[in-house]
Image: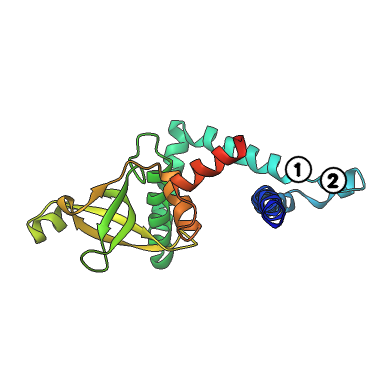
């Protein structure tokens, strides 16, 4: 009886905890994007026009701004404007470093032909016979290969439970083991502190189907 009760509790938690966290994250993003409504003149805002707020209007405004910006800047005049804007930012020391780094990372991640984070690897770190999960981000710069007389690759080692932080290592290509594992599954493994593995996911799915 106790085992059955425990099974029902765990099954309920497996449904409600992920759902609750998903709702909280989505609500946070919606609230953040809704703040773009302050870009409208006070007389144009929903509370002034209709007498009440319109949740989600900020998302529509954000999407329109992003789309229109992309539409305008993809033509020749837009590209010239981008070059002028970036040339201006390049003259500001601190802004130059931050802007160029963020832009390069964004271009790499959003590029349709990017190989970033497409490979899950294992490396011996922090010492031999201890294995750490990491992601290949790119091939290392030629200067690094020349300095070490070896072919290196750049890997990102995520921290747990927050995989957005971590550090990079330059590893000889022959010292890594490529894993037959989806990036999504690898990230779940990191965020769950190693609890959620591909095997455990398959087992849970089988139990639910039964």
Whether residue 11 is visible: yes
Q: Nearer the viewer, residue 180 or 70?
A: 180
Residue annotated with mark 2: 46
Question: Where's residue 46, x and y in %?
Answer: 84, 45
Give the x, y percent position of residue 205. 56, 39
Give residue 175's position: percent from left, percent from top: 18, 54
x 32%, y 44%: residue = 119
Q: Is residue 19 above or below residue 166?
A: above
The mark that comes first in sequence, 2 or 1, is 2
Q: Secondary structure at mark 1?
A: helix
Q: Nearer the viewer, residue 77 or 52?
A: 52
- Residue drawn 40% across the image and 34% down it: 112
CB within 8 Å, label 2 to label 1? yes
Residue 57's disc is 1
Q: Nearer the viewer, residue 135 or 178?
A: 178
Give the residue drawn at x 67%, y 48%: 11
- Cα separation between marks 2 and 1: 9 Å
């Amino acid at each position: 009886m106790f085992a059955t009760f425990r099974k029902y509790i765990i099954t309920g938690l497996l449904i409600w905890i992920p759902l609750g966290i998903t709702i909280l994250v989505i609500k946070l993003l919606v609230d953040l994007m809704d703040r773009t409504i302050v870009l409208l003149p006070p007389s144009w805002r929903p509370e002034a026009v209709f007498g009440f707020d319109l949740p989600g209007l900020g998302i529509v405004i954000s999407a329109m701004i992003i789309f229109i910006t992309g539409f305008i800047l993809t033509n020749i005049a837009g590209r010239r404007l981008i070059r002028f804007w970036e040339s201006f930012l390049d003259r500001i020391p601190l802004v130059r470093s931050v802007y160029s780094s963020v832009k390069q990372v964004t271009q790499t991640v959003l590029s349709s032909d990017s190989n970033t984070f497409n490979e899950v690897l294992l490396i011996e770190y922090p010492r031999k016979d201890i294995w750490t999960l990491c992601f290949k981000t790119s091939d290392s710069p030629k200067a690094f290969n020349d300095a070490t007389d070896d072919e290196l690759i750049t890997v990102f080692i995520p921290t747990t439970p927050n995989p957005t932080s971590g550090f990079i290592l330059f590893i000889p290509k022959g010292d890594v083991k490529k894993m037959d594992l989806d990036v999504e599954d690898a990230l779940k493994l990191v965020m769950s502190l190693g609890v959620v593995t591909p095997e455990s996911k398959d087992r849970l799915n089988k139990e639910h189907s039964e």
